[in-house]
Amino acid sequence: MDVNNDTVKTTSEQLEIQVNNDTVKTTSEQLEIQYELSCEKEDDASAFKDETCVSSQNALSDHVDSDPQMSKKSIKKQQNHEQYLARKQAVRAEKRKAKRERIRNLRQTEGQESTNKLPKKIELKQKRKRLADALTDGQRVCIDLSMSAIMSSKEISKLAQQLGRVYGANKKAEKPMHLILAGLELDSDIHKACVQKNDGFNNYLIEKSEKPLLEMFALEEVVYLSPDSDQVLEVLDDSKVYVIGGLVDENPIKSHTLNHAKQCKLATARLPIDEYMHRQPNGTHSKILAVNQVFEILLNFHNEGDWRKALVAGVPKRKGFIIKTSEGSPVCL
C-alpha cells in the first residue's frame, strides 16, 4: 500500500510545475531535436513496415516450401510477390538515405549562410552609409515632379508608389546613385501621397527640393530621358544629371516628355532598347516604361556596366522584347 501511495503522488501542483517546465523548453535546439526525433520515428515506422514485409515474405516462403500441393502458377505468383516486396524494401531504404542526406546538406547550407550573413543592424548601417556617400559623389539621377499638376489623384498615387520602389532599389544597390526629387513642394498632392504610401518617406536618404529642375542645374548638365528622343544613351557621364520625367499617364500622349524637354531647351536621350533588344511577335512593343523601371535600368547599368543585363532586368516581358546577341540575333536570357 505504501508503494502505491508513493507512485500516486502526482498532485495538481506537481502537474502544474511539470507543464510549466515543458512549455518553457521551446528553444531552437530542442525544436531541432524534436524534428530529428520525428524523422527518426518516420524512419522507424518505415523500417517496421519493411520488417513486416520481410516477415510476411518469409512466412509465405515457408508456406510454399511446406505445401508441396501448390501449383506451378501459384509458386510463380508467390515468387513474383516476394521479388516485389524485396524491391519495395530497397526503394524505401534508398528514400530514407536520400532524406537524411538532404537534411544534412540543408543544415550545412544554413550554417554557412548564418556564418557569412552580417547582423541586420550592421547591414542596415552599411546601406545607409552607401546612400550617404552617394549623396556626396554618386552619379546624379533626378526625377522631375513638375508634371504632377496634370495628373489625376489615381495617377499621383501610382507615382508615389513608384518612387518608393525607386528608393528601395537604390537602397539595396552596392553602388547606389545620388537620387534627387525636383519640384517636390511641401503640402502638394504628390508630397502627401509619398508620405501616405511610403513609410519613413521624410527620412529617405535622398535629395529633395521644392525648386524646379532648371533652378537646380545648368542647362548643359541636364540630359532628359525620353523614349521618343533621337539620341541614344550609351554611357553615363559623371558630370551630367539624368532626368526621368515623373509622369504616370494612363492614356499616354506621344512625345510628351520630349516636347517638355525641348520647351526647356534641354538635351535628350533614350534608353538603347532598339540597339540591344529584338521584338517578339507577341507583346505591346511599347517603350514607355514606369519611373521605377527606367531608374532600375540606369542603376543596374551603373553597377554592372552591361546594357543587356540592365535591360533584361528592367524591361517587363509583356512589352515583347528579348535581348540580342552580339551578332544581332535574338536570344532569351
Image: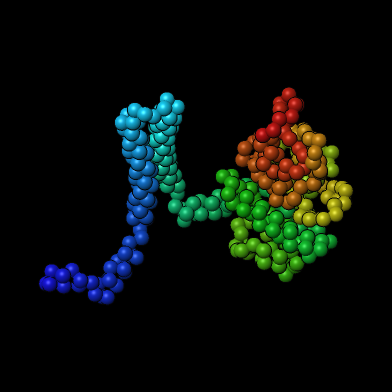
* Image point (31%, 68%), residue name: 19
Q: Where is residue 72 in the image (x, y as percent from the top left)?
A: 42, 25
User: Image height check: is 272 above or below 202?
Assistant: above
Residue nearest the observer in this picture, 17 or 228: 17
User: Which image quadrant: the N terminus?
Assistant: bottom left
Asked whether the viewer can see residue 165, the reply is: yes
- Work out which residue is located at the far left of the displayed protein and give it: 2
Q: Position of residue 163 (x, y in %)?
A: 69, 56
> Exactly how many numbered labels are in the figure?
0
Asked whether the viewer can see residue 133, the reply is: no
Residue 88 relative to residue 48: left or right = right
User: Which image quadrant: the C terminus?
Assistant: top right
* Image point (67%, 67%), residue name: 196
Please identify the quarter of the rendering in which residue 276 is found.
top right
Q: Where is residue 274 in the image (x, y as percent from the top left)?
A: 79, 35
User: Image height check: is 58 above or below 193?
Assistant: above
- Work out which residue is located at the far bottom of the displayed protein and give it: 12
* Image point (35%, 48%), residue name: 41
Residue 254 relative to residue 269: left or right = right
- Work out which residue is located at the far front of the displayed protein and give it: 69
Residue 214 relative to residue 1: left or right = right
* Image point (81%, 43%), residue name: 284
